[in-house]
Image (cartoon, helix red, strand yellow):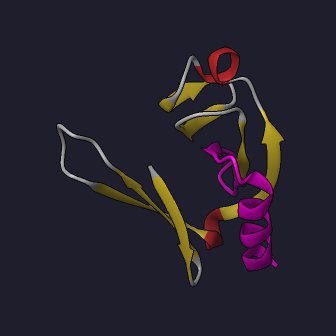
């Protein structure tokens, strides 16, 4: 999985061997706030990958750090990243 930001959106590309590449977009207009967090992939989401758990949806590949996005519709989305502070900084700069 790869994430990048451009203008007012966060882009995500899922790369899978058995499927076509799929792009998703998180528009900054729909993000209420973001927090850099440490989490438990197994406990909170049942593992790695694109997962659903008690705390919402997660996009993670490895590790236990990421950025929790709280959306304006009340949903939470976790983006796993070992560079969580850098990702959080970029997202918060765009939210201001």
When the figure is inspected, residue 40 is found, relative to residue 80, above or below; the finding is above
Q: What's the residue at 57%, 17% (across, down)?
A: 46
Q: Is residue 39 above or below residue 29?
A: above
Q: Is residue 87 left or right of residue 96?
A: left
Q: Residue at x 65, y 24 (%)?
A: 41
From which residue to which does the magenta span run? Answer: 70-96
Q: x and y percent of residue 39 in the render?
A: 76, 30
Q: Residue at x 74, y 52 (%)?
A: 84
Q: For this rendering, which residue is in front, 91 or 84?
A: 84
Quarter of the rendering containing residue 10: bottom right
How far from the left and from the top, in percent, is residue 16? 27, 42
Looking at the rendered structure, the number of numbered marks drawn on it comes to 0
Identify which residue is drawn at 52% across, 37% down. Answer: 61
Decide whether residue 59 is among the magenta residues.
Answer: no
Of residues 77 and 37, which is closer to you in this image?
A: 37
Q: Is residue 74 located in the magenta-colored stretch of the structure?
A: yes
Quadrant, the C terminus: bottom right
- Which percent across, then down, holds residue 76? 67, 43
Q: Residue 25 in the image: state x and y as whole percent.
A: 46, 64
């Amino acid at each position: 999985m790869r994430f990048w930001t451009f203008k007012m959106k966060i882009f995500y590309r899922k790369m899978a061997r058995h499927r076509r590449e799929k792009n998703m977009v998180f528009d900054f207009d729909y993000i209420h706030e973001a927090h850099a967090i440490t989490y438990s992939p197994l406990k909170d989401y049942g593992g790695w990958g694109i997962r659903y758990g008690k705390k919402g949806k997660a996009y993670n590949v490895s590790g236990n750090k990421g950025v929790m996005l709280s959306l304006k519709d009340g949903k939470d989305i976790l983006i796993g990243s070992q560079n969580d502070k850098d990702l959080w900084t970029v997202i918060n700069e765009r939210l201001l």
